[in-house]
Image: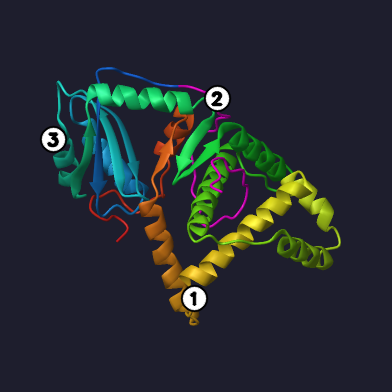
Amino acid sequence: MKRKSVLLAGCSVIAAAFAGFVLLTSNSVANGDLALAELKVKKMTCGSCVATITEALQQLDGVADVDVSVTSGRSKVSFDPAKVDSAQIAAAVSASGYPANLVRELSASQYRTLQAEEAQLAEIYVAKIGSQFLARDDFNQAVEQRMLTAGLQQRPATPSQVLAQTWQSLKQQILLLDAAEQNQVVVQDGEVELRIKQLRQQKPDFDTQILAQYGSSERFFQQTKAEMIIQRNIEEHVLSGIKEPRQRQARFNQWFQDLIGQSPVEIYDVGLKRAASKTGGGGCGSGGGGCCG
C-alpha cells in the first residue's frame, strides 16, 4: 500500500546547510502577472554555481524569483512575460557558463492555477518528494525532536543546522524508501524486533538513549524498520553481485544520483522554499562553468 505521509527522522546520507530557522506555518504567495519557466541546467556542481546563475538572471528586467537546484540540475524562474521571455532567460543562464534548455513554460494563468493548488497542499504538507507527501505536522515534530536531541549534546547544533539536517534526512530517506517500495521490498516486524534485541544487548543504557534521541520506542522501531528496508533494497536491487568495495561505492553513488535526478521535489511551504534557495555547497570559487571541476 502506497504511503502518502511519511514520518522519519534519521538516515543521514548527505548533509547540507540552510540559512535561517523556521517552524513552518501555512502560507502562500501569488502574483497573477507572473509566468514560470523551468530549465534544465548543465555543469552545476556547488553553491557558487547557483550564485552565478542567480546573479545573471537578476540582471534581466522582469525576472522575479529564481529557484536553482544543483542536485536535480533544474531551475525554476518566475518572470513578467511583458518584460522578458523564457528564451532570454535560458540564454542568460547559458551565457553565465551553464548550458540551459527550456523544459516547460507556464503562462500566467497556468502559474496561478499551480500556485493555488500548492497553497491548498501547503495547509497540510510542506513538500512532495518523489511520489510521497511530507506532512507539516510530521516535519515540525521531527524538527522539535532533533532540537531536543541537539540540546542534550555537548556542542549542540544551531537551529538553522537542525532544520537543514531534518529536511535533508527526511528527503533522502523518503526517496530511498520510495525506491524500495517500487521493488516491493518487505521487512517483517519480527526481523526488526530481532535487530533491536541485538542492539539492546550491545548497549547497557540502550533504552535511555533511544528515549532521548527518538522520543519513544515506537519511533525507533519505525526508524529501524525503514533503514532495514532501505538496506535490503540496496543490497538486492542495486549492489547485487558486486563484491569489490570501490565498485560497490561507485555503483551506489551513480544509482543514488540517478534516483535524485529522476525524483522531483516540490516544496509547498514558502518559508522552507526560501531557506532551500539559500542553500549552498560552500566555496569552490566564483567563476561559471563547473566551478568545482
- Residue 240 numbered tag: 1
One can see residue 231 in this view:
yes
| Element type where label 1 sits in the image | loop
Q: Amino acid at mark 1?
A: Ser
Q: Residue at x 47, y 79 (%)?
A: 242
Would you name the residue on which mark 3 appears? 88
Horizontal arrangement in the rendering, residue 61 relative to residue 142 (left or right) = left
Would you name the residue on which mark 2 appears? 25
Task: Note whether 18 is above or below 81 in the view shown.
Answer: below
Residue 162 sits in which quadrant?
Answer: top right
Could you say which is closer to the camera, residue 282 or residue 142?
142
One can see residue 96 in this view:
no
Upstream in sequence: badge 2 or badge 3: 2
Q: State the extent of the magenta-drawn residues as a range.
A: 1-27
| Element type where label 2 sits in the image | loop
Q: Locate residue 269, reporting x and y percent.
A: 47, 30
What is the CA distance from the residue labelled 2 to the residue labelled 1? 43 Å
What is the CA distance from the residue labelled 2 to the residue labelled 3? 35 Å
- Determine crowd level at label 1: few under 14, some 14-19, many 20+ residues with C-alpha closer than 10 A: few
Task: Note whether 213 is above or below 160 in the view shown.
Answer: below
Q: Locate residue 132, reporting x and y percent.
A: 49, 43
Task: Note whether 245 is above or below 18 in the view shown.
Answer: below
The majority secondary structure of the magenta stretch comes to loop
Q: Residue at x 20, y 46 (%)?
A: 100
